[in-house]
Image (tube, rainbow, N blue to C red):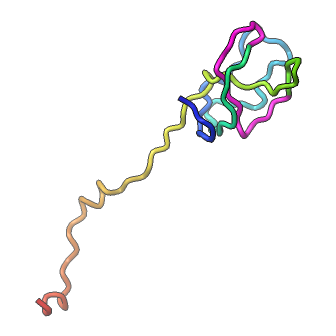
Amino acid sequence: MFHLGQKVVCIDDKIPEPVASWDTLNGLTKGNIYTIRWIGMYKSTRHELHLCIRVEEIFRKPLDYYGIETPFNANRFKPLIEKKTDISIFTSMLPPAPVKKKELENV
């Protein structure tokens, strides 16, 4: 579902309840686009494993015993779907270009 370098959109910037005073989102904002720089499993404070990511745009200070940067739960994001612009449907509706007089003389 996710890969390094992928653009993702934040869909959840709520701080869970109850929350410890150190548990902040460091500027994570719903609707903003971020770039994945790390993906992996991370053990929560309840010792549950979760798929998590770190993003290029936000660096969080380490909050665990090992000094490892705390990632964001991957459930807070969805992949950004980039739509490529295709105007072929509109160009196909254009009338054919008129034939120039000089082109008719050469026939």
Q: Is residue 43 left or right of residue 8?
A: right
Query: In the image, residue 16 lies at what x, y percent?
Result: 71, 13
Residue at the image point whose x is 73% and y is 40% from the top: 57
Q: Is residue 93 left or right of residue 55?
A: left
Magenta highlight: main SS: loop
Query: In the image, residue 59 lies at what x, y percent?
Result: 79, 34
When the figure is inspected, residue 42 is found, relative to residue 104, above or below; the finding is above
Query: In the image, residue 87 lies at what x, y percent?
Result: 35, 56
Give the quadrant of the C terminus.
Answer: bottom left
Asked whether 68 or 63 is in front, the reply is 68
When the figure is inspected, residue 66 is found, relative to residue 88, above or below; the finding is above
Q: Which residues are magenta?
A: 44-61
Residue at the image point whose x is 56% and y is 29% from the top: 78
Which picture quadrant has residue 13? top right
Count how many numbered circles sit on residues in the image.
0
Residue ranking furthest to the left = 107
Residue at the image point whose x is 66% and y is 16% from the top: 50
Asked whether 68 or 14 is in front, the reply is 68
Asked whether 41 or 73 is in front, the reply is 41
Query: In the image, residue 104 lies at what x, y percent?
Result: 13, 88
Query: Is residue 3 found inside the magenta-colored segment of the image?
Result: no
